[in-house]
Amino acid sequence: MDAQSISDILNPQPTDQTQKQDILGKEDFLKMLVAQMQNQNPLEPMKDQEFIQQMTSFSSLEQLQNMNDTLSQDVQWNMMLSQTISNTMATNLIGREVTAQANVTSITADGATPIKFTSDSFATGGTITIKDGNGKAVRTLTVSNIQPGDNSITWDGKDDNGDSLPSGSYSYDISLQDARGNSVSTETYTSGVVQGVRYFNGQAYLVIDGSFIPLADVRNVSLQDGSGG
């Protein structure tokens, strides 16, 4: 039986039966090349052109594998470097006052933190739906005459029944309309002093009024220390 060609191995023809395809590595390639040379017909030696083509395929295979190993190492190093820089930046923000893109409000011992957002244009009315940690709506606020730009809405930390809600972090959704009933775009944000840093799955989160804010969502940092010290 003729030895299987290297070209046939690198470019297998489809068959009716589904077979498991193994990846041909450098060691496998060399073994198969030696086997082909040992089993070739002495009266019909491998042509120079075919031999050169197969050696070129081996060279490309080796270069691709080496390139893949190098890129894998580079990606790992870049991830470690990026994470180290992020962690360092996060800890340096402790005690600073920051503004971050987020739709969170918190209930603390001092009361409920304001709901902050930016409106693209004037809105005649709308609603703000506050949700607990499980995503359940606990309070719906009705608002009117919302001016374009930054807005801050205070609430009393109570649910729709007038009962005080427990301390913790809450999220909210905003729906505003103009005089014609068209939706008005908004962008929510929060601001406060960074009280600490927490890590989840290797990512740094800033602790602001009991809420966890991703470092990547920070859009402004005060140059002044916000701790009051």
Image (spheres, helix red, strand yellow):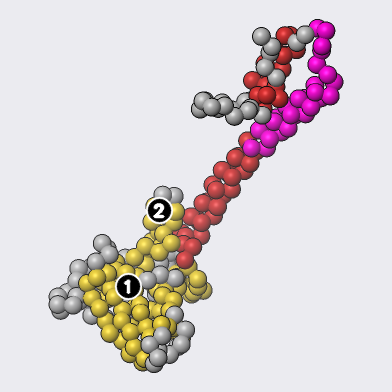
Can residue 66 be seen here? The reply is: no
* 38 relative to 136 in the view: left or right: right
The residue under the point 29% across, 75% down is: 129
Q: Is residue 168 left or right of residue 188?
A: left
Secondary element under disc 2, as helix, strand or loop, is strand
Question: Whole-percent x and y of residue 69?
Answer: 63, 35
Relative to the observer, which residue lies in front, 32 or 50? 50
- Residue position marked by numbered label 2 in the rendering: 199
Residue 5 image point, x, y percent: 70, 19
Residue type at tag 2: Tyr
Q: Which residues are magenta?
A: 42-68
Q: Is residue 61 magenta?
A: yes
Q: Is residue 101 above or below residue 63?
A: below
Which quadrant of the figure contains the N terminus?
top right
Residue ID for mark 1: 172
Whether the magenta-drawn stretch holds residue 116 is answered as: no
170 vs 8, nearest the viewer:
8
Viewer-side residue, 81 vs 155? 155
Q: Residue furthest right?
A: 48
Mark 1 residue element:
strand
* Residue at the image point whose x is 41% and y is 75% from the top: 188
Residue 92 x, y percent position in the rendering: 48, 62
**Residue farthest toward the front in the current orientation of the protein:** 16
